[in-house]
Amino acid sequence: MKPVMQLSSLISRVCELYFLIGSEELERCGVTKPQMLIIQQLKQGPRTIGEISRLVDLSYSTTSGIVDRMERHQMVVRKKDEKDRRVVWVSLAQHLKDLEDKLPFLQEQYNEELFSRVKPEDMEGIMQSLQIVYTCFTHKWDALKREKGSEHE
């Protein structure tokens, strides 16, 4: 098998296993994948439903429904903007530390354990290699989006 095909296969297997681990951890914590996507965005600060929707690439109504359920479970809170009452901000209901306690895979210690077999001297090289792969994927993704955009013109 050519090295480029080996690389593609390895990336695919790593991603699949990483997502399986993530799915299992989410299930243990009673959090869905879409809820986790929203949590990741809200860790950066309050956002509107429209912003969240665009960032997680879900429809506005789907995102709103997920936020509704998260609000019922006291994971997020909604607050009207003080200057424009039409704008509603969504933020995490709990302090980040509380959230990390509920979701152990957000903790640094969890990730240290996950990567415990990686030698410290190998870590930088792996990160550089993954950055190269990420750049390649970003270029392809951007080209696909441009191509898709031109189809709709």
Image (spheres, rainbow, N blue to C red):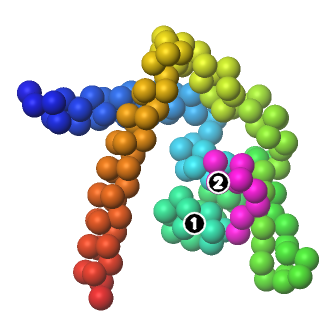
Q: In this view, does 151 lie above or below 130?
A: below
Who's the residue at 42% across and 41% down the image? 131
Q: Quadrant of the C terminus?
A: bottom left
Q: Position of residue 83 (x, y in %)?
A: 89, 82
Q: Position of residue 53 (x, y in %)?
A: 57, 66
Q: What stretch is highlighted in magenta?
A: 40-48
Q: Quadrant of the N terminus?
A: top left
Residue 152 sits in which quadrant? bottom left
Q: What residue type is labelled 1?
A: Ser
Q: Is residue 92 visible?
A: yes
Q: Give how far apart the Cα atoms at labels 2 and 1 are.
A: 10 Å
Question: Is residue 13 found inside the magenta-colored segment of the image?
Answer: no
The dominant secondary structure in magenta is loop
Q: Is residue 32 left or right of residue 21?
A: right
Which secondary structure lies at badge 2? helix
Residue highlighted by disc 1: 53
Q: Nearer the viewer, residue 119 or 48?
A: 119
Q: Nearer the viewer, residue 95 or 143?
A: 143
Residue highlighted by disc 2: 41
Q: In this view, does 49 lie to the left or right of 75?
A: left
